[in-house]
């Protein structure tokens, strides 16, 4: 499973990138707003830190497909690794089809059902982003959606890649990997939690103490 980092914070991306295991970056309007900077002002720095697909979402206020296409073309021009993130709406699907014709990569976001994933894939989406955590938030099984989309895409040999999004804790990452998600996009905090295990910390402490007893 590829790992993307789900943040627009440059310090988090820089630190995560030093691990050498980050394959891409996803942002969304909320994450961009949190940084207080416009997408175009942070994206070049992000692209310089991670050499992989970088999802930049169209403005939250852009709703018509013609405007989505125009904005998508501008986002794609920012860097060769840019992927245009488009919400799963009727206009969004049309925009994805048009951007695909132009050879521009897309990530259809806010996916909450297999039908939405299927339609996005049929429109030519490079990626679909089903939101695991937000389904769990309303007592629906987010991981089950990943299993179902993997099943359907496998049935029809659909090349659209599945980015498991809205990952809230390390077990989400484990379950997404078991379900066969192509990618999980993971917040910095969860990525750091994935590194840790209390027995690793205890083991290191014991090795240090045993070593020092004999060798000082
Ligand atoms: C990434 O593509 C999504 O926008 C993000 O994972 C959403 O996460 P959240 O549900 O924790 O806001």
Image (cartoon, rainbow, N blue to C red):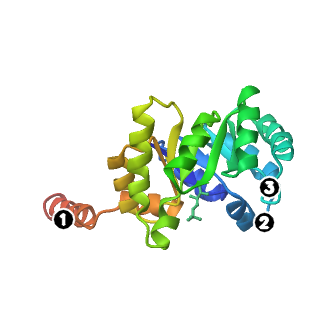
| Residue 141 vs residue 84, the one in the foreground | 141
Find residue 111 and name its label.
Answer: none
Give how far across and how far down residue 76 sits, in percent: 77, 36
Residue at horizontal 70 percent and vertical 48 percent from the top:
86
The disc, 1 or 3, on the residue closer to the chain's N-terminal end is 3
To which residue does mark 1 refer? Answer: 206
Give how far across and how far down residue 72 sits, in percent: 79, 41
To which residue does mark 3 refer? Answer: 59
Q: Quadrant of residue 112?
A: bottom right
Quadrant that contains the C terminus: bottom left
- Using the rendered image of the protein, determine whether residue 1 is visible from the camera's viewpoint: no
The disc, 3 or 2, on the residue closer to the chain's N-terminal end is 2
To which residue does mark 2 refer? Answer: 36
Give how far across and how far down residue 22 sits, in percent: 51, 44
| Residue 48 vs residue 151, the one in the foreground | 151
| Residue 211 vs residue 81, the one in the foreground | 81
Judged from the image, the quadrant occupied by ligand 1 is bottom right
Residue at horizontal 70 percent and vertical 52 percent from the top:
89
The disc, 1 or 2, on the residue closer to the chain's N-terminal end is 2
Q: SS at mark 1?
A: helix
The CB of the residue at mark 1 lies under 8 Å from ligand 1: no
In the rendered view, would you say 21 is above or below 31?
above
Residue at horizontal 53 percent and vertical 60 percent from the top:
166
For marks 3 and 2, give the CA distance. 14 Å
């Amino acid at each position: 499973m590829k790992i993307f980092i789900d943040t627009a914070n440059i310090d988090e991306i820089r630190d995560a990138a030093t691990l050498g295991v980050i394959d891409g970056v996803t942002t969304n309007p909320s994450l961009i707003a949190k940084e207080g900077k416009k997408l175009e002002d942070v994206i070049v720095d992000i692209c310089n830190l991670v050499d992989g697909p970088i999802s930049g979402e169209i403005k939250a206020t852009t709703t018509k497909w013609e405007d989505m296409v125009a904005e998508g073309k501008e986002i794609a021009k920012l860097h060769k690794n840019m992927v245009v993130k488009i919400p799963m709406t009727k206009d969004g699907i049309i925009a994805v089809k048009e951007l695909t014709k132009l050879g521009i990569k897309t990530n259809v976001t806010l996916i909450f059902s297999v039908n939405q994933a299927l339609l996005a894939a049929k429109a030519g989406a490079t990626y679909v982003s089903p939101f695991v955590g937000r389904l769990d938030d309303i007592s629906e099984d987010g991981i089950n959606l990943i299993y179902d989309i993997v099943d359907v895409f496998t049935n029809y040999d659909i090349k659209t890649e599945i980015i498991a999004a809205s990952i809230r804790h390390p077990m989400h990452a484990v379950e997404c990997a078991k379900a066969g998600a192509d990618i999980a996009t993971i917040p910095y905090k969860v990525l750091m939690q994935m590194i840790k295990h209390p027995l690793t910390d205890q083991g290191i402490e014991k090795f240090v103490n045993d070593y020092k007893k004999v060798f000082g």
